[in-house]
């Protein structure tokens, strides 16, 4: 039986870069990987974009209504082999889609490695991440630092250069002057009190 992995971290912890490195490692050994990304993540379109400037084409963009198990099952029926499934921005997936990823790992024996955020800019959990924290066989934190040098665990949202702590859960980085900054707990509370 293969496993479902969840690798989470604050913004700038290298999640997308690590995903592309894992894909490269599999492919260097002649193995087939497919990369999934939720359609709701408009950043880069059908391309993974790393802050280091490394990019990679996504194999499948997944809509919120899509049954991932059926999509992968159909992919396999076309006589295509999959050695590993990599998922970027997994926090945007729905609870039932995480269940489908778990089912793929267990019943189709394909390892699945998911990368994403644990919490949003309000310190609330994402639906996909919350389900992964319950189901994943393995959970690993990817670490990064706050501007003050402490370990960052939160994501601060900036609009027009100012921190905001209210609004819709999803606003994609680098669209409509939205930016994110990884923050430690101390700085998060400092900016809530003084959002500049």
Image (spheres, helix red, strand yellow):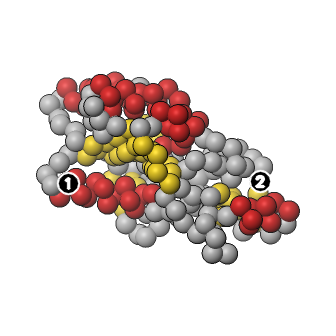
Which residue, as the protein is rendered here, is positioned at the far right? 193
Distance between the Cα atoms at labels 1 and 2? 41 Å
Identified at 14% across, 31% down, the residue is 79
Q: Which residue is mark 1?
A: 27
Identified at 62% across, 48% down, the residue is 119
Q: In the displayed structure, does residue 143 sit left or right of residue 157?
A: left
Q: Quadrant of the C terminus?
A: bottom right
Q: In the displayed structure, does residue 138 sit left or right of residue 32?
A: right
Where is residue 192 shown, x and y percent of the image? 81, 60
Identified at 22% across, 39% down, the residue is 82
- Compare marks 1 and 2 and give the one earlier in the sequence: 1
Residue 179 picture quarter: bottom right
Q: Kindly indicate whether the residue at mark 2 contacts the one at mark 1 (C-beta within 8 angstroms).
A: no
Identified at 28% across, 54% down, the residue is 23
Label 1: how many Cα within 10 Å (few below 14, some 14–19, many 20+): few
Q: In the displayed structure, does residue 5 sit left or right of residue 1?
A: right
Which numbered tag is attached to residue 165?
A: 2
């Amino acid at each position: 039986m293969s496993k479902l992995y969840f690798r989470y971290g604050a913004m700038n912890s290298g999640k997308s870069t690590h995903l592309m490195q894992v894909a490269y490692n599999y492919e260097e050994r002649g193995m087939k990987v497919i990369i999934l990304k939720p359609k709701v993540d408009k950043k880069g379109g059908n391309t993974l974009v790393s802050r280091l400037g490394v990019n990679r084409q996504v194999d499948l963009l997944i809509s919120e209504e899509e049954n991932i198990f059926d999509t992968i099952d159909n992919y396999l029926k076309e006589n295509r082999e999959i050695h590993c499934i990599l998922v970027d921005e997994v926090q945007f997936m729905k609870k039932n889609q995480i269940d489908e990823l778990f089912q793929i790992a267990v019943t189709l024996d394909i390892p699945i490695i998911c990368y994403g955020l644990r919490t949003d800019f309000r310190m609330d959990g994402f639906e996909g991440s919350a389900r992964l924290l319950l189901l994943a066989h393995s959970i690993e934190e990817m670490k990064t630092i706050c501007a003050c040098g402490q370990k960052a665990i939160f994501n601060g949202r900036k609009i027009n250069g100012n921190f905001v702590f209210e609004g819709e859960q999803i606003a994609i980085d680098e669209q409509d002057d939205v930016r994110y900054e990884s923050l430690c707990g101390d700085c998060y509370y400092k900016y809530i009190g003084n959002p500049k």
